Image (cartoon, rainbow, N blue to C red):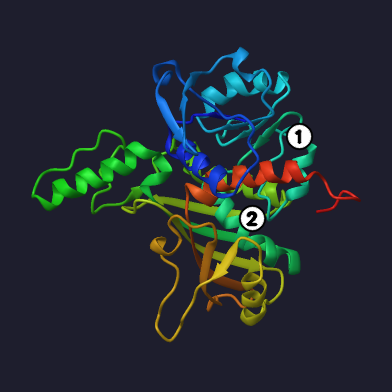
Amino acid sequence: MAILGATGAVGQELLQLLDERSFPVARLLPLASPRSAGQPLSWKGETLQIQPVSAAAFAGIDVVLASAGGSVSRQWAPLAAAAGAVVIDNSSAFRMDAEVPLVVPEVNPQAAFSHNGIIANPNCTTILLTLALAPLHARRPIKRVVVSTYQSASGAGARAMEELRSLSRTVLDGGEPISAVLPHSLAFNLFLHNSPLQPNGYCEEELKMVNETRKIMGSSELRISATCVRVPVLRAHSEAVNIEFFEPFAVDEARALLSGAPGVELLEDFEANRFPMPTDVTGRDPVAIGRIRQDLSDPHALELWLCGDQIRKGAALNAIQIAELLLQGPPAGGAV
């Protein structure tokens, strides 16, 4: 197995999860840009040397977990696939390619087996959202989704997380926070997601949620609108979700479905007004869902709140779960 982008926040999480989940790795090859080549990397008691990515590096590799950005993936993923590896790519480079499956193992595991050498890992917020939508959609088709995200610094990488720490100290010390990583300081602040704005007024991150959710759920006509916000949280994203169905959906029925859904945990105490928080899921696998309620403005709609660790389930864990699916192989009959 090779990890492309081994020095980044997601790359480090991949290494940890491979160990935690006892993934059967016979040989691990950490790959990164030439400037990181030669750096030592500790894994399972061994010290590995980070190697520069090259076409020759993929010889003999079965699986590549790529998390080094879209331009890097576009350059190297086809070469790795041509060398015989399956690339599970965490960037946006191939997500909307019709020939590349976009997979959340709890939602559409069968799609993983239709790959041509590359499998795309969805956007972090999309992964968290589809875990909540899929069990409900399977019972009663969804007509429309309106989602607002509250995205932590981890979504912008390790440097953004460190900047939030340092600029928070600056503000507490009475200084002026000046951001070098993000376009604005997140310290005691929030701002609309900084991905490029599109002509329709939505940003790229919001359109990822729209298009990727439709592809994963196999519902090209699903009406969905997203507003994405960066908030001063180190790790774990949150989402407020309004889900409209074609017919009424009882809250108790939805709650029962979600409490038994894979990858989900129900966390709600209405008496104590206690629902999921980023601290509940940081460093953990499940997506926590709570405050499931009837939309007062629409008898066909439900509201819910969710939190999930962006680096873990929103990126590294989902990629490793895809690799685990491939190890298991497609079940008899082709259904999962």
Q: Residue furthest bottom?
A: 271
Q: Work out whether residue 282 can be spotted.
A: yes
Callout 1: helix, strand or loop? loop
Q: Work out whether residue 123 can be spotted.
A: no
Residue marked by disc 2: 223
Q: Earlier in the sequence, mark 2 or mark 1?
A: 1
Mark 1 residue crowding within 10 angstroms, few (<14) / some (14–19) / many (20+): some
In this rendering, which labeled residue sits more in front, label 2 or label 1?
1
Q: Which of 218 and 172 is in front in this view?
A: 172
Residue shown at the point (71%, 69%) measured from the top left: 246
Q: Which of 37 and 235 is in front in this view?
A: 37
Disc 2 residue type (three-letter): Arg
- Residue 126 in the image, given as x and y percentages of width and height: 57, 50
Residue marked by disc 1: 115
Q: Nearer the viewer, residue 39 or 138?
A: 39
Instruction: Give the answer, above or below, for where 244 lies relative to 179.
Output: below
Callout 2: helix, strand or loop? strand
Task: Measure how far apart labels 2 and 1 are at the Cα level.
Answer: 27 Å
- Where does the N terminus fall, quadrant-wise? top right
Q: Which of 326 and 233 is in front in this view?
A: 326
Asked if the residues shown at circle 2 and circle 1 are in contact, with their CB atoms under 8 angstroms apart, the answer is no
- Residue 31 in the image, given as x and y percentages of width and height: 51, 24
Instruction: Give the answer, above or below, for where 30 lies relative to 263.
Output: above
Q: In this view, does 110 lie to the left or right of 164?
A: right
